[in-house]
Image (cartoon, rainbow, N blue to C red):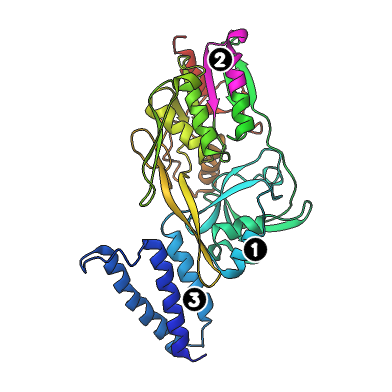
Amino acid sequence: MPKSLKISTLAVSAVLLLTVFLGANAHRVRAASDPQDGAFRQMQVYSEVLQHIQSEYVVDPNMGKVTDASLRGLLETLDSESSYLTPAEYKAYKSRGTGPHTQIGVNVAKRFSYATVVSVVPGSPADKANLADGDAIESIGDKSTRDMSLAEVTMMLEGQPGSPITLSVIRPRHATPEKLTLNRADTALAATSEVFYENNSILYIKPGALDKEHVQQVEQKLKKMGSTNSKKILLDLRDVATGDDAEALRMANMFIKTGTLAMLEGQKVAKQTFTADPGKSVNTTAPMVTLVNHGTAGPAELVAGALLDSKRSDLVGEKTFGAGAQQRTFELPDGSAIILSVAKYETPSGKKFQDEGLTPGVAVASAQEVATVDEDDEDGGGDGSTSTATVNSSKPSIPSAKPTAAIDDQLNKALDLLKAKSA
């Protein structure tokens, strides 16, 4: 194929992608001053850049890879959930099916161009390898995650039970990558756990996910509160990053009797307001505190945002991850596809938390965060400061979601707040 034809084909493909992205069609002709028109004018620049690369780069470049990289970058500059899939990647993506997929027990997203661990399933291979939220997966095998879409990262983590996978991981505040080889395994999410504190007066609830099964378990435990003499509620949403948005809203409704729970809106998605149904509430008066951290994502953030804005519960812990978008897949003429965020959730006050997360009113660093800062101080690599307040505690160890932590300051602080509340 002549070079000029290659350039034309690539430019046309890019225009098609941009047309889908901008929602352009024959019935939406805009004036030249419209920003959308300006975006199309930029395509001339893009075409010119391609021509220079094709004709003047030091060697004859692989223009397919160049264009794939540019399209991937275009989507990832929008938000961490949007992805571009090449024809081969999209074919593999569609062949995955909808059933469970065996991997190493991590939920991931793209942050700062690389795959980042959002949360880890307790008891999974990733948990046993001490992976934690905030760890960056620099590469999977010999391929950098910088060159992958989020969908491709997810597919590469999956495989047959027992099959090995090699990761290069960069821990927070550690510049040197760590090579890890893990074996994939089926890891079931633990049932919703409960613990009673202060002579049964405080009911601690921790769901492993916010799917139908776990939310149902939360509801059952709330309905049994009277028989256990519990007067207060401690909800632990730390490292809860999976589930169903509808189930999350249903769970928020259990604690909130009236008012707005969340909103959803996009350029072509009409604004939806999700309102509490008094008939579906379970316990809307018991004093309540909710624990969150960097691994609190997606459906769990819907719950946390509703509780925070309604002033139903204090939030204690760390800033949440920031995953609150609804995606749609668009197939393109060459067999490729884009997974595009078409709408974003908002808290009742109108805050979009996609990529931004939610900030708790009471900030308390995790044991892992404190340990990392301490390591930096010992090595002379840190200044001893952190953007998150640390609650120093001399209390004995309290069971938590991470039993390896000697003291769970976040949990201790939440219990202190609840003790000070009148039942």
Q: Residue 354: within the magenta?
A: no
Label 1 crowd (10 A; few <14 / some 14-19 / many >=20)? some
Q: Is residue 226 visible?
A: yes
Q: Nearer the viewer, mark 3 or mark 1?
A: 1
Toward the viewer: 109 or 401? 109
The image shows residue 333 at horizontal and vertical percentages of 51, 71
| Distance CA(mark 2)–CA(mark 1) | 48 Å
Please tell me which of labels 2 and 1 falls first in the chain: 1
- The relative height of residue 332 versus residue 393 in the rendered view (above or below) is below
Residue range corresponding to the magenta coloring = 219-236
Amino acid of disc 3: Val
Residue in the image at 52% along x and 46% along y: 376
The image shows residue 16 at horizontal and vertical percentages of 42, 71
Q: Is residue 293 visible?
A: no
Please tell me which of labels 2 and 3 falls first in the chain: 3
- The relative height of residue 175 versus residue 191 in the rendered view (above or below) is below
Read off the residue under disc 1. Answer: 92
| Distance CA(mark 3)–CA(mark 1) | 21 Å
The image shows residue 21 at horizontal and vertical percentages of 40, 62
Amino acid of disc 1: Ala
Tags 3 and 1 in contact by the CB under 8 Å rule?
Answer: no
> Which residue extends farthest front?
27
Please tell me which of labels 3 and 1 falls first in the chain: 3
Q: Which mark is residue 154?
A: none
Question: Which type of secondary structure does the marked residue at label 2 adopt?
Answer: strand
Toward the viewer: 236 or 276? 276
> Which residue extends farthest right?
162
The image shows residue 291 at horizontal and vertical percentages of 51, 29
Q: Nearer the viewer, mark 2 or mark 1?
A: 1
Q: Which mark is residue 66?
A: 3
Read off the residue under disc 2. Answer: 202
